[in-house]
Image (cartoon, rainbow, N blue to C red):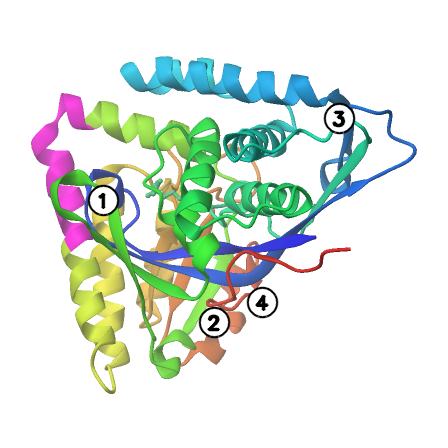
Amino acid sequence: MASAPGKTILMGEHAVVYGAPALVAAVDLRARATAAAADDVPTGKIRLELPDLDHAELVRTGEVREYASRARRRWEEFSRSPGRESFARMRGEGPGHVSVVALGEAMEAVARRGGGTDEDRGVRVAVSSDIPIGRGFGSSAAVGSSVALAWLARAGVDPTRDELERLLLEVERRQHGQPSGVDAAAVLRGGVLWAEPAPEGTGFRFESVTVPPDLLGRFRVVDTGVPAESTGEVVSAVRERRERSPEAVDAALGRIRDATREFRRLLGEAAPEPADAVELVRRCQRGLEALGVVPEPVRELVRAVEREGGAAKISGAGALTAEQDGPPGGGLLLVLHPEPERIRGWSFLADVEVLDVRPGGPGARVEEIA
Ligand code: PMV
């Protein structure tokens, strides 16, 4: 059995896709996957069980590898001309997509090390998760890494973190298109991480950060509902906007980047002033709004928080359009207030959920080998 945490982006989303830094935290919600030989599963097959999604499927081991390599080819085609339409063509639809891709990539990793695919027994792979899906909590990275880790552990493979990070980045690409990789890093490493762009576009250097508890404890995570568009669609739309209006989009990305760097500096202070953090969260949110990823009903919530003397920003990709009926649909909203106990009493948050989630859980790990 392996498990992995969800994550929340404290600051830097979207800009990080273009090589700016980000601050990202694992959270204390986890996904768990087990992979075990099962007598009631036919030899050479895998029964994938996803009770949270009310889904189960029986697949041949070979089909899993074929699915993963077809997904890889579709992704390569998409990455030659990334956009909203090519993303929609690339993306797998079924509830088992992330798990099957993670299994297929893990099988490739075992094969690269000269291991077999264990055709002589049927295997049950079961996944469960407390991480809400599609909100920006990194559910796909958590599911992908726990499934891959469980499969690798069963095959007797103890991957290096680099290997695991590369594997998970491939899984995330099949789900989100062109992810920056910060989700994968946060979920694998745990804690709070600073992602500093490495020279010449070679990815990121990750550094563990200790956020003064006095400041971290003033954040609350609010669920504003599932965005109308997936992360991949929102990221592709921003890319298209940037091609059409590079100056406006780069100015918005620059505001996010600068606020994120200043926030990092603030965290280095012995006793950061909550008022300074409030100011930086507001500035970052203005950049996100200028990018066009914060729907109107979410902006209204943010203004209401600001009138109360706090600050709020979306955490994750956000959304392009508001949901017609129902919740505002911006995914996660981080709310910061010098007196956080007041947050639960605000009537304008009555229709959204203030979650009991704390940043900074441990990273992906094998829990148990039977
Ligand atoms: O929606 P999420 O939390 O999966 O995060 C998306 C964050 C982006 O910066 C918009 C994309 C990325 O890959 O970093």
Pointer 4 residue = 356
Q: Is residue 354 rendered magenta in the image?
A: no
Question: Mark 3: which amino acid?
Answer: Glu
In the image, the segment drawn in magenta is 242-257
| Mark 2, secondary structure of its residue | helix
Tell me which label, 3 or 1, sits earlier in the chain.
Answer: 1
- The residue indicated by pointer 1 is 15
Mark 3 crowdedness (10 Å alpha carbons): few <14, some 14-19, many ≥20: some
Question: Is 198 situated above or below 336?
Answer: above
- Tell me the tag on residue 119: 3
Q: Disc 1 versus disc 4: distance between alpha carbons?
A: 28 Å
Q: Assign the C terminus to one quadrant of the image.
A: bottom right
Give the vertical position of 251 relative to 2 (above or below). Answer: above
Instruction: Decide if residue 110 is on the left or right side of residue 304.
Output: right
Ligand 1: give its quadrant. top left
**Label 4 secondary element:** loop
Q: What element carries label 1?
A: helix
In terms of sequence position, does the residue under pointer 2 or pointer 3 come before the other?
3
Instruction: State the image coordinates of residue 356 (x, y, percent, origin top left).
Output: 58, 67
